[in-house]
Image: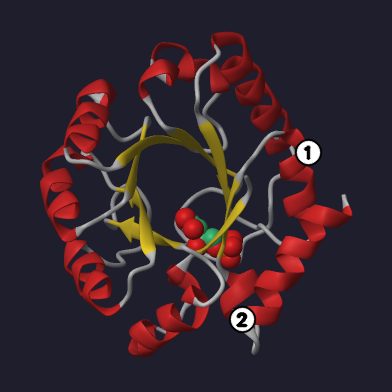
């Protein structure tokens, strides 16, 4: 079943709780971008924000760690209540260990791939993860343009999942809007992260409706 995950990177940080309440009327999960200023140029939020939002809202949180060597941070994010956590294969020397820690902590575990990272890196990890996050822009900023060649990668990962017969979901993130969402859906994605397409809209409810409708129209 497809899901839309609003990325709070594009929300108004001064009113974060209100922004989360606003979208939580329409979705059951939000996407939380954690950036360390090293793996990607920006610095955003940490486990304290996940914990604070957990106290404010029941909405589930999908935490995307854009962080060099994220293993040491996992216990904090798990304790804060993260429901899904992904680590980048490009940033983590011991991906299997990270996946194991996330699962043992009770969250769903994902691996994230930058646009230039080939699907083949998943061969030895696909059986161990709950989801693969395919970045459809280079991570670091909201509001970038979707990279069309990522559709091939989505298809390649969908094929690998089918061949290995594993219950792994494909998540896409970056430049997702009512034009790109149906293309990704057709290629095999199920989880759609959208930041500016939702939070830049005056009416977030209508923006989410538009995204959901675009999936049906295809
Ligand atoms: O991880 C990231 C950016 O690095 C994303 O989650 C962005 O927040 C997506 O924003 P839009 O491309 O949808 O505006």
Q: Which part of the image, by quadrant, shows the N terminus? A: top right
The vertical placement of 8 against 127, above or below, is below
Is the residue indicated by label 2 positioned so its CB lies within 8 Å of ligand 1? Answer: no
The vertical placement of 148 against 98, above or below, is below
**In the rendering, at what x and y percent does residue 145 appear?**
68, 57
Near-viewer residue (39 or 185): 185
**In the rendering, at what x and y percent does residue 85 appear?**
32, 45
**In the rendering, at what x and y percent does residue 134 appear?**
54, 39
User: Which quarter of the figure has residue 208?
Assistant: bottom right
Mark 1 crowdedness (10 Å alpha carbons): few <14, some 14-19, many ≥20: some
Near-viewer residue (139 or 27): 27
Q: Earlier in the sequence, mark 1 or mark 2?
A: 1
For residue 12, the mark is: none
The vertical placement of 122 against 203, above or below, is above
Read off the residue under disc 2: 204
Near-viewer residue (65 or 90): 65
Residue sitting at x 12%, y 54% = 79
| Label 1 secondary element | helix
**In the rendering, at what x and y percent does residue 186 appear?**
78, 38
Q: Is residue 135 visible?
A: yes
Read off the residue under disc 1: 186
Is the residue indicated by label 1 positioned so its CB lies within 8 Å of ligand 1? Answer: no
Mark 2 crowdedness (10 Å alpha carbons): few <14, some 14-19, many ≥20: some
Residue sitting at x 17%, y 40% = 105
Residue sitting at x 36%, y 59% = 61
């Amino acid at each position: 079943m497809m899901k839309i995950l609003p990325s709070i990177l594009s929300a108004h940080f001064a009113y974060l709780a209100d922004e989360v309440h606003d979208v939580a009327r329409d979705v059951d999960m939000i996407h939380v971008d954690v950036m360390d200023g090293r793996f990607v140029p920006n610095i955003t939020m940490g486990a304290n924000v996940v914990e604070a939002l957990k106290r404010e809202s029941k909405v589930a949180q999908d935490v995307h760690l854009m962080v060099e060597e994220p293993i040491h941070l996992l216990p904090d994010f798990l304790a804060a209540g993260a429901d899904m956590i992904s680590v980048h294969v490009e940033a983590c020397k011991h991906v299997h260990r990270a996946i194991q820690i996330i699962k043992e902590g009770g969250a769903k575990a994902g691996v994230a791939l930058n646009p230039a990272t080939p699907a083949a890196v998943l061969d030895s990890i696909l059986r161990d993860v709950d989801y693969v996050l395919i970045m459809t822009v280079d991570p670091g900023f909201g509001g970038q343009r979707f990279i069309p060649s990522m559709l091939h990668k989505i298809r390649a990962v969908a094929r690998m999942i089918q061949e290995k017969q594993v219950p792994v979901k494909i998540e896409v993130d970056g430049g997702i809007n009512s034009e790109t969402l149906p293309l990704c859906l057709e290629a095999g994605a199920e989880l759609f992260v959208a930041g500016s397409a939702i939070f830049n809209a005056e009416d977030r409810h209508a923006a989410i409706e538009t995204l959901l409708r675009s999936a049906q129209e295809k």
